[in-house]
Amino acid sequence: MKYALTFLCLISLLKVETMLFDFTKTCNISDWRITNDDVMGGISTSKISLNTDGNGIFYGNVSTENNGGFAMTRLPVSVDLNEDTKKIVLRIKGDKKNYQLRIKSKSYQRYWYVHPLKTNGDWEILELKLEDFYPSYRGYKLNKANFNWDRIEEVAILIGNKRDENFKLEIDYISIL
């Protein structure tokens, strides 16, 4: 009986990781969408593809011409969260530039919940607390509570550093823990 209780206690401590997207050589990335500043007159360009190692590559050029300045890739998802879900985990290799990880609790929301990402040029695993994602619309922080929903319906990565720049972000996976 003592061992059974110990086993049950250990199981309750284990966290189950839910994969939002795992990039592999054979994965289908056709559901990833590109949204650049051209939706409002800008001329930034970006793409998402797979490299020979099977990692996602989000790359392109951000231009501030024509009041532009951002590039984004986004993925519709359908993930229910529970009270034990506390963070988003991603493994990335950046180019020492700043990005944002963005989530929506409802696909029809006009605003995103945002968490900044500062990449260091090496492979890194980032654990981002869901409670630290703040609401933002068109670059402005909203006077609303930080993320406290029980569902994620869209995830995105955005670069928009208010300067002209080429960028390249390598992504291994994005998960929820």
Image (cartoon, helix red, strand yellow):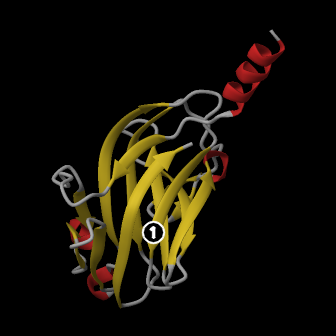
Locate residue 177 relative to residue 42 in the image: left or right: right
Q: Position of residue 170 (x, y in %)?
A: 36, 72
Question: Horizontally, is 157 left or right of 122 in the view?
Answer: left
Foreground pick, 23 / 144? 23
Residue 53 placement (x, y as % from top left): 27, 70
User: In the image, residue 64 lies at what x, y percent?
Assistant: 34, 86
| Mark 1: amino acid | Ile
Task: List the residue tagged with mark 1.
Answer: 92
Quarter of the picture holding the N terminus? top right
Rendering coords of residue 36 (x, y %): 26, 69
Q: Residue at x 34, y 52 (%)?
A: 22
In the figure, 2 relative to 52: above or below? above
Give the structural element (helix, strand or loop) at label 1.
strand
Return the residue found at the far right.
Answer: 2
**Side of 130 relative to 55 (left or right):** right
Locate residue 43: give its quadrant: bottom left
Most foreground residue, 38 or 128: 128
Residue at 34%, 40% (x, y): give it: 77
Question: Which residue sits at x=53%, y=54%?
Answer: 89
Q: Looking at the image, is 14 positioned above or below residue 52?
A: above
Q: Nearer the viewer, residue 147 or 144?
A: 147
Residue 70, by quadrant, is bottom left
Residue at the top extreme? 1
